[in-house]
Amino acid sequence: MTVLQTILQVLLVIASVFVVLLVLLHKGKGGGLSDMFGGGISSGAGSSGVAERNLNRITIAFAVVWFVLIILLGILTRAGA
């Protein structure tokens, strides 16, 4: 395994953790798991529209980084095999 693959794998783990945490920060839309764990009760006290849009942008950015890291690791793995 090369140093580049190791660095990409570490970055992938970090990006994965951030994507999971960012998705969990989103306000529940109702009818899903968020309601089952009490998200429906506090839906009125959620974040403002601007904060939610910024959270969406950050989540999408981390998801794109995660996707690119997966593709790069796949290319490096295939080239090394």
Image (spheres, rainbow, N blue to C red):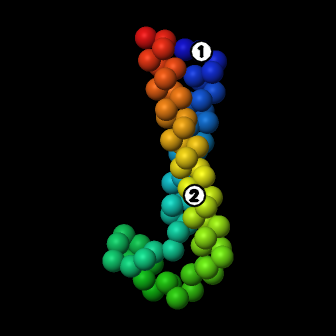
Depth check, front residue: 53 or 38: 53
Q: Residue 2 carries which label?
A: 1
Depth check, front residue: 71 or 47: 71
Query: In this picture, is 55 found above or below 5?
Result: below
Query: In this picture, is 33 found above or below 8?
Result: below
Question: At x 44% / y 17%, what residue is drawn?
Answer: 78
Image position, residue 10 (x, y; %): 60, 33
Where disc 2 sits, the SS reads helix
Query: In this picture, is 7 found above or below 21?
Result: above
Q: How many labels sit on residues?
A: 2
Residue 51, by quadrant, is bottom right
Which label's residue is closer to the chain start, 1 or 2?
1
Image position, residue 33 (x, y; %): 36, 70
- The residue type indicated by label 1 comes to Thr
Query: In this picture, is 62 found above or below 76?
Result: below
Question: At x 48% / y 14%, what residue is drawn?
Answer: 79
Task: Rate crowding at label 1 as few (under 14), some (14 to 19) or many (20 or more) other CA atoms within 10 Å.
Answer: few
Residue 22, by quadrant, is bottom right
Please give left or right for residue 42 compared with residue 50 in the image: left
Question: At x 55% / y 14%, what residue is drawn?
Answer: 1
Q: In which quarter of the image is the C terminus?
A: top left
Q: How far separated are the C-alphas under marks 1 and 2?
A: 29 Å
Where disc 1 sits, the SS reads loop
Image position, residue 9 (x, y; %): 56, 30
**Farthest top residue in view:** 81
Question: At x 45% / y 86%, what residue is drawn?
Answer: 41
- The residue type indicated by label 2 comes to Thr
Return the residue at label 2: 59
